[in-house]
Amino acid sequence: MDKKGILLVISGFSGAGKGTVVNRLMEKYDEYALSISMTSRSPRPGEQDGVNYFFVSREKFEKTIAENGFLEYAEYCGNYYGTPKEFVNKQLEAGKNVILEIEIQGATNIKKVFPESLLIFITPPSAEELEKRLKGRGTETDEVIAKRLRRAYEESDGMDTYDYIIVNDDLETCVEDVHSTTMVARNQPLRLHGFIENMKTQLEMFK
């Protein structure tokens, strides 16, 4: 069987818990690899270069754009975010399901480049819960929280471009929903094209 992995794009409102879902998915299952994005923003407390992101200058990021080194990139709240090509391709060929945790704009671009990719949007059960989670972080000002909520309203227009919407009401349930959805999608005929073609070739001897 074709062992090539699937490109799994996970997006969600800021505060929806998508990062926690991705981390738990990586802890529970071996068949996933997390794509490390490049960004021009500064590291947050506790973040490490090469682990959470590749942190680079704006100039370095724009140089990589010019060299066609990204699968996708976007500018969000004044900073660049992008997905380096090389890592993703190597992991897919090794049979890993590569997770891209990116914004809606980037997800739309990925779908154009990789029509067979799986797009999942993580959302809290309500707008009220989203506001509660953002405030519960205790790391951002009221002004920043208001900005993120306005951004969520804008992003809601793009939710219908995703293959699946998964509600993060209970973490473990959400993680299992993402995993089962990914495994079903990976085994769809479109994604098993190489296996199908190989089987047809082998069956020719019986025609």
Image (cartoon, grey):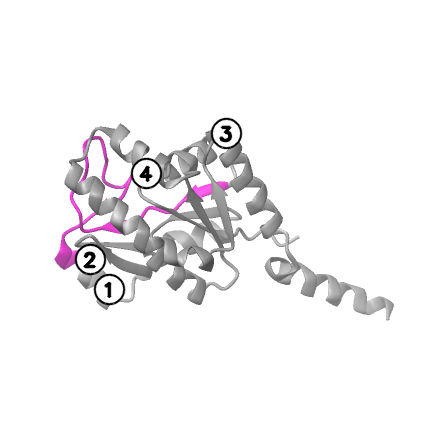
Q: Main secondary structure of the magenta part?
A: loop
Report the Cα–Cα distance between label 2 and label 4.
26 Å
Residue highlighted by disc 2: 61
- The quadrant in which residue 21 appears is top left
- Disc 1/disc 3 C-alpha distance (Å): 37 Å
Structural distance between the alpha carbons of marks 1 and 2: 6 Å
Q: Where is mark 1, residue-wise?
A: 65
> Earlier along the polypeptide chain: callout 3 or callout 4?
4
Q: How many marks can you see? A: 4
Say what amino acid the circle numbered 3 marks: Glu
> Counting other residues with Cα less than 10 Å from the Cα at mark 4, is it few (<14), some (14-19), or many (20 or more)?
many
Residue tagged by mark 3? 172
Q: Which amino acid type is shown beneath numbered disc 2?
A: Phe
Q: Quadrant of residue 23?
A: top left
What residue do we see at 54% from left, 35% from top?
176
Residues rendered magenta in the picture: 32-60
Residue 85 in view of the camera: no
For disc 2, the neighbor class at 10 Å (few under 14, some 14 to 19, many from 20) is: many
| Residue beneath disc 4 | 15
Q: Mark 1 packing: few (<14 Cα in 10 Å), some, or many (20+)?
A: some
Q: From mark 2 to mark 3, how far is it between C-alphas?
A: 36 Å
Query: In the image shown, does 192 or 206 lie closer to the viewer?
Result: 192
Does 68 sit above or below residue 27? below
Q: Is residue 173 above or below residue 13?
A: above
Please state the horizontal and vertical placement of residue 24, each as a whole percent of the image: 44, 32
Q: Nearer the viewer, mark 2 or mark 4?
A: 4
What element does badge 3 sit on?
A: helix
Is 36 displayed left or right of 54 in the figure?
Answer: right
Q: Is residue 108 above or below residue 77?
A: below
Horizontally, residue 148 falls left or right of residue 160, namely left
In primary-sequence order, the first of circles 2 and 3 is 2
